[in-house]
Image (cartoon, rainbow, N blue to C red):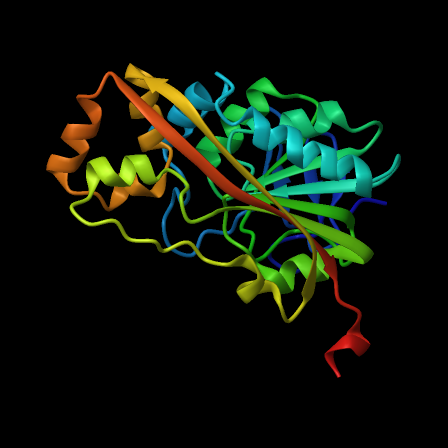
Amino acid sequence: MGILVCPICKKELNKIDKKEICENNHSFDYAKEGYLNLHISKNSKNPGDDKVMVNSRREFLDKGFYAEISEKVNELLKANITIGDKLLDVGAGEGYYTNKMAKALNEVEVFALDISKEAVKKGAKTYKNIKWLVASGLEEPFKDKSFKGITVLFSKLFSKEFKRVLDDEGFLIVVSPNREHLVDIKKVVYPMIKYENIEPIDELKDDFELVKRENLFYKKAVHGEDIKNLFHMTPYRWKSPKDGVERLESLNYLEVTVDVNVDVYRKKRSEEHT
């Protein structure tokens, strides 16, 4: 028995050949790269990160600039998950972190979910040890209590859905930017620096309790094309003044601050809401 449900009618999906089909005959084909598209688009035909952001992220992350983040997440995963469990990475992008999770964990079934078809397609081409899905984190195509753990790295939080698909002993690991994260880019691009980072607990407090927080703070020298790739993989790409972007992209060297919080949350029991 699988854990996938139809995004249209919410009935169980069953794999037949290279399709997933529900009892109402809604059918979804596996792509040649191996991923399954279960996103029912209501607006944009291609939501999520575009090809430029996906390729920039792959180029930057593959050089190990954020390796310390991956290592910390995997350390916490190993302390909370066991053989036979299922893990879901929400907002997995092209799979840099997800792949390292799958390699670090022994006999754990790893799923990667992202709304960006470009990202999932690239990830599925490269990392065959992961089950890839195009879907929204707001409507995750899984049965209730399907996962022991969920990871969310630099992505949106969907508290109610996380609570629904986690089992009663489930945990959630969230990586979020802290105050000084990438402040060096902001200093170059913007005339005034704004600190707009959201505190995850504010979004999760109704359904989860914070049990552990570790801060990672370090600096990395970034050169040439890597500066551009870092910028283009961030949301700053969409809301930065043209002259600021030109200043940044003219640089050959920038020391970049990494300042992130790695949190572990536990799912609240229903009685804890009283």
Q: Residue furthest bottom?
A: 274
Q: From this viewpoint, is residue 125 visible?
A: yes
Q: Quadrant of residue 224?
A: top left
Residue 53 percent across, percent down from the top left: 37, 31
Which residue is depicted at the point 36% across and 35% down? 50
Q: Residue furthest left?
A: 243
- Left or right of 133: which side holds 85? right
Residue 174 percent across, percent down from the top left: 60, 48
Residue 272 percent across, percent down from the top left: 77, 76
Above or below for 143 versus 131: below
Which residue is depicted at the point 65% across and 34% down? 72
Which residue is depicted at the point 58% across and 62% down? 201
Which residue is depicted at the point 45% across and 35% down? 258
- Left or right of 181: which side holds 241? left
Q: Quadrant of residue 222?
A: top left
- Left or right of 228: which side holds 14? right
Locate the N terminus and report the quarter of the image it occupies.
top right
Q: How many marks?
A: 0
Above or below for 93 versus 45: above
Q: From this viewpoint, is residue 51 visible?
A: no
